[in-house]
Image (cartoon, helix red, strand yellow):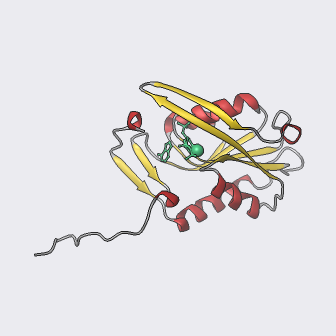
């Protein structure tokens, strides 16, 4: 993660905000599929894409849900992504009619790899940074490249000192 630093800003997302933004993503995707507006299946890029994919599949009443597991390596300025678990090949085909969902696109390396595998799939993320934007078809909120997004599953409620401090 250190090669992604320095991140000048932090964008902290609550479960409620993630739910609202994922719902907004679902509504934007509704009726946009290639088969009379319908989508055949939802595929989550694990692990971060699982919560948004669950919400999208629920909103759009899509019962066929699969996962693709991608591991990313970041050594200095080199990045490599590797598929650890592929979705069902018969279901996927070339990706036509399949919604592939992730929590965010940052450098775009994860989506670039998955796009090579399923060129006709539709790629959607809840959040996007400018570098990765060309890799994503639909997203909800853009944040600057120097912003680190903190997701609710990586955070906990914690005491903070009052603004004026204590004696
Ligand atoms: O656009 P990129 O630079 O490829 O970065 C975006 C990816 O990085 C994060 O996943 P991560 O590899 O940290 O794994 P996780 O989803 O299991 O947390 C995030 O969930 C995206 O999948
Ligand atoms: Mg991820």
Query: What is the residue that sits farthest to the front in this orientation?
Result: 84
Residue drawn at the location 46% of the way across and 50% of the way down: 149
Rendering coords of residue 78 (x, y %): 48, 24
Rendering coords of residue 143 (x, y %): 46, 47
Q: Quadrant of the N terminus?
A: top left
> Is residue 8 visible in this depiction of the protein?
yes
Rendering coords of residue 107 (x, y %): 52, 34
Residue drawn at the location 14% of the way across and 74% of the way down: 166
**Front-most of residues 48 and 28:** 48
Rendering coords of residue 72 (x, y %): 56, 35
> Is residue 104 visible in this depiction of the protein?
no
Query: Is 125 on the left or on the right of 164, as rendered?
Result: right
Q: Quadrant of the C terminus?
A: bottom left
Query: What is the residue that sits farthest to the bottom in this orientation?
Result: 167
Query: Is 139 on the left or on the right of 161, as rendered?
Result: right
* 163 w.r.t. 118: above or below: below
Residue drawn at the location 69% of the way across and 61% of the way down: 55
Query: Is 22 on the left or on the right of 74, as rendered?
Result: right
Residue 4 found in image quarter: top left
**Front-most of residues 13 and 38:** 13
């Amino acid at each position: 993660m250190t090669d992604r630093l320095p991140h000048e800003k932090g964008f902290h997302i609550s479960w409620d905000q993630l739910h609202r933004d994922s719902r907004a993503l679902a509504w934007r995707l509704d009726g946009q599929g290639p088969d009379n507006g319908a989508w055949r299946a939802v595929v989550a890029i694990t692990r971060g894409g699982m919560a948004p994919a669950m919400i999208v599949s629920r909103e759009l009443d899509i019962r066929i849900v699969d996962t693709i597991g991608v591991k990313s390596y970041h050594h200095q300025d080199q990045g490599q992504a590797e598929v650890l678990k592929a979705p069902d090949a018969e279901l996927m085909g070339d990706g036509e009619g399949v919604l592939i969902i992730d929590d965010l696109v940052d450098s775009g390396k994860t989506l670039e790899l998955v796009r090579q595998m399923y060129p006709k799939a539709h790629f959607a993320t809840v959040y996007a940074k400018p570098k990765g934007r060309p890799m994503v078809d639909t997203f909800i909120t853009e944040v600057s490249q120097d912003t680190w997004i903190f997701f609710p599953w990586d955070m906990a409620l914690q005491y903070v000192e009052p603004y004026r401090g204590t004696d």
